Amino acid sequence: MRSRSSVRGGGWRMGRLTPLALASAAVWISAGCAVFPQGAYWPEPHTLAARLHRAEAGAAAAPSPAGFAAPPRADLVAAVTRRWADDGLADSARRMNGWAGRSAYADAVRIVAWCYVEKVSYRDLVVAGLESLRAALESPQFRRRFEAARDDQRRARFAEALDILTLKARAADLWFAFQAGDWLAVAMEKNRALLGLPDGAVVAEFLFGAMDRLDPYTRFLTADMLRDYEEQEAGRYTGIGVALEVRDGRVFVARAMEGGPAAEAGLAAGDEIVAVDGESATALGPAEVVRRLRGESGSAVTLSVLSPGAEEPRSIVLLRRRIVLPAVRDVQVLDPERGVGYLALTDFRGGSAGDLRRAIRGLQKQGIQALILDLRDNPGGLLLAAVETCGVFLDGGEVGNTRGRMLGATWTYSVPWPDRPAWRGPLAVLVNGGTASAAEVVASALARRGRATLVGETTFGKGAVQIRLPVDWGRCAVSVTIARVYDVEGEALNGLGVSPAVEVAGRGEEAASLRDDAVVRAALEALEALAPEADGP
């Protein structure tokens, strides 16, 4: 499977679920943990392994979630290596003091233990942190970041101490977050005595190691990450204006945004970013490439770019600037003779549904009789924005539901009662493996309700809802998975995705034009078959 990422980020970016869920989180976190039944919120483990590359977990201790057993050490080391490629994280680790780190850690694990979709114990979180820190000692990237980790003898003694701590932690009986913080404090004391890493490096591995073990979407966010997160939700950032995709560890341009520095310099879909400011993109990793493409407005970044068919990469110097991402793009009458309109929805954020309605009204004035909605490579966004988008095409009714342990996380979502459809005519929706989360909710609802024909490839399969809760007085945050998403027929989206009625392989960016795109051509044929039986707009 190809994994995708972009300079604007992806995923649900769930800043909110429902007003009740937010109120519940606030009351629950301040008052303590209530007892809720543990449900089967995940699909079968083999399904997740196939779709999300999760390692086989095997049998875990009874109180642990099904996927909480430690992955192979090599996978842990690889995760550490990717993490510490981030210069910002390394700088934050050096600045953090032990007391502040312990406080942030206790806040973060409390949120996870109380709010996560599956029951997880403080003991499991502590063990995951210890195992991640132990794996960090084997990572060359980690050793490059911290000089103290380069002493083989001292590193070996600290590794032995961590192994002993891990054995003890597995037998511990932890009931409160401050007890988990005590284990972090012990690990920091051992580090000071035996190795000498910055306290922040120990804290980071305890935090990121615990979050990584839960699922691909629960994350601890440093101050820098939190700022990027908020920019993604607002649909604007400072950078060069590209969306990226990753194939076999190599970074490619999926789309150069119109009017951005990258498009103006001639970057196009399919170009490979070989290096950023002289450093290999493969060695940096996708997350660090994204971070380095951002920066102060007016600052320069030098890219080494290899275009398809070229023998040697070329060097391009780009000046970063403020990028405002349109929610709707490429609005056009694709087939004037048959009156087929086309538009692409890039993600789901506040105002996306309104932008979509305005674009459709503009196409209606041009006399369209059918519409193609392109959700390919749409990474998702806010769940409520997806529900509002369904109201652009559906006349009321349910669009899906969520299930979780936290009060308010189990909820049925319907089209808001005041909303009226902006488009009632024939509709085809384009999807592919990059169609994820909120985009899958929309695609599933329109297909299951018989409102649209899906064309393309099976979607990614991210049916997980996160909310973002503050840590360390709002300076950091945890984005924690609180619910699973199900379609109107009760089928889980996570790990399964949504299958199209008309299957067509291919990506629109590789075509010379939309009319040459095999998926678009298939959608036109599907709409032509529907036209005699469908009402007009």
Image (tube, helix red, strand yellow):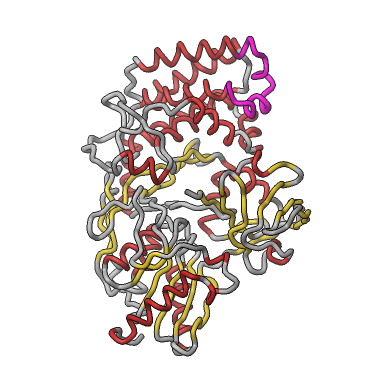
Residue 291 in view in this figure: yes
Residue 148 among those drawn in magenta:
yes
Residue 410 among those drawn in magenta:
no
Viewer-proximal residue among 145 and 384: 145
Quadrant in the picture for residue 121: top left
* 173 over 415 or under it: above or below: above
Q: Horizontal and vertical percent for residue 300?
A: 77, 53
Q: Horizontal and vertical percent for residue 376?
A: 47, 63
Residue in the image at 50% along x and 81% along y: 334
**Range drawn in magenta:** 137-155
Residue in the image at 26% along x and 25% along y: 62
Residue 406 in view in this figure: no
Q: Horizontal and vertical percent for residue 122?
A: 36, 26
Viewer-proximal residue among 443 and 456: 456
* 373 over 49 or under it: above or below: below
Question: Where, quadrant-wise, is the C terminus in this rendering?
Answer: bottom left
**Total label count?**
0
Quadrant in the picture for residue 224: top right
Give the prevailing secondary structure in the magenta stretch.
helix
Residue in the image at 46% along x and 35% along y: 212
* 104 over 279 or under it: above or below: above
Residue in the image at 50% along x and 53% along y: 10
Quadrant in the picture for residue 385: bottom left
Q: Is residue 182 left or right of residue 245?
A: left
Q: Is residue 176 left or right of residue 87?
A: left
